[in-house]
Image (cartoon, grey):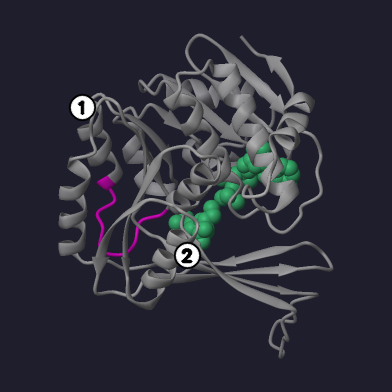
Amino acid sequence: MILTVTLNPAVDKIIILDKLKLGKLNRVKDAKALAGGKGINVSEVLSALGVDNTALAIVGGDNGNLINNYLEKRGVKTDFQWSNINTRQNLKIKENNSNRETEINETGRVTKKDIKAFKKNLDKYLTADNTIVLSGSLPEGVNKDIYAELIEKAVTQDAKVILDSSGEEFKQAINKAPYLVKPNLAEIENLLSTNIESDADLKKGAEYLLKKGIKIVMISLGAEGAFIASKDEAYRLYTPEVEVAQTTVGAGDTMVAGLAAEIDKNSSLKETAVYASALATVFVKSGSIENVTKEQLNEIRNTIKVKKIY
Ligand SMILES: Nc1ncnc2c1ncn2[C@@H]1O[C@H](COP(=O)(O)OP(=O)(O)OP(=O)(O)O)[C@@H](O)[C@H]1O
Ligand SMILES: O=P(O)(O)OC[C@@]1(O)O[C@H](CO)[C@@H](O)[C@@H]1O
């Protein structure tokens, strides 16, 4: 089974307007509030695909209730730790005239008690049969080594950990050898303090992570596609150009959902990468995975070009 962990979930408030006028009154064309946070998005995609999974998260207050109800309506299985602190709200501003997206994410906060209870609950899921997705930033009140600590525990139970994080917590976590990491370009550049401009640079970046004992490295490159590597093989994937239907927010999470689904099935590295890339691209093109048909997914899948690096 697949489990997703979101220590810092959010209500995503999406605001759509023609052009954002800073320092002026702006009237919005459309607005909606969705359940968000990276692991929760992964669970939503998996559930829409009919892949068995449970979303674990710390939630609280009215925003926690909104997330809970939203997921319940969509048939997403959850096992939430309830906090006395209201879950954060993240603002996403989409400008129709330019397609520019501006994200304003709150920090989020939990107590030591929330974390202790969450970890205790998570322990029961750490078994060899499970694939565990650790995703997103950490709220205030959580130590930066928490992902490292959770990976260390999962590894001793032979659970496979997929990690999508950044900053200090990412740096600490990679030393505990999660099964797969999915940095985007900025995250890997930041980790290595270098610019990545070529396939050779991508290969070097992936090698740095593989040497730590990580089995698979998937580097997502936005509209440019992705790069995947294990110690035995590596591929550069070129995805087709598509028009952004709504927003690219959540494209990375959709890719992680695809990776988790394929890894849980023990698919080949190439098939895993192609499926995850196709899913992310079809999400960008359609605005959601909910209404995507198998035919639409296959159409994108067949247009992805794959170059073998080694
Ligand atoms: N503009 C785009 N056009 C086509 N495909 C895209 C676009 N943006 C993202 N994708 C697809 O989604 C994948 C993940 O995107 P990206 O590298 O931006 O991840 P991310 O930064 O983790 O995303 P997120 O915005 O969810 O945090 C890409 O590898 C690609 O397959
Ligand atoms: O602040 P974090 O945890 O880094 O990212 C949170 C977030 O921006 O990521 C998701 C999209 O990937 C959104 O649902 C959510 O608002």
Residue at 43% from the left image edge and 71% from the top image edge? 66
Q: Which comes before the other along the chain, label 2 or label 1?
A: 2
Q: Which x, y percent locates residue 202?
A: 60, 26
Residue 138 visible: yes
In this rendered view, identify the residue nearer to me: 185 or 235: 235
In this rendered view, identify the residue nearer to me: 95 or 143: 95
Which amino acid is tagged 1? Gln
Magenta highlight on residue 109: no
* Residue bearing mark 1: 157
| Distance in Å between CA atoms under marks 2 and 1 | 32 Å
Q: Secondary structure at mark 1?
A: loop
Chain part drawn in magenta: 137-146
Q: Which x, y percent locates residue 293?
A: 70, 40
| Depicted 298 relative to depicted 81: above or below | above
Q: Main secondary structure of the magenta part?
A: loop
| Quarter occupied by the N terminus | top left
Please tell me how crowded label 1 is: few (under 14), some (14-19), or many (20+) other residues with Cα within 10 Å: some
Quarter of the view holding residue 116: bottom left
Q: Quadrant of ligand 1?
A: top right
Residue 221 visible: no
Q: Which x, y percent locates residue 166?
A: 45, 46
Magenta highlight on residue 141: yes
* Residue bearing mark 2: 70
Residue at 79% from the left image edge and 75% from the top image edge? 19
Q: Which mark is residue 66?
A: none
**Farthest bottom residue in view:** 25
**Farthest right residue in view:** 97
Q: In the rendered picture of this protein, how many numbered marks are placed on residues?
A: 2
Left-right relation of 86 to 221:
left
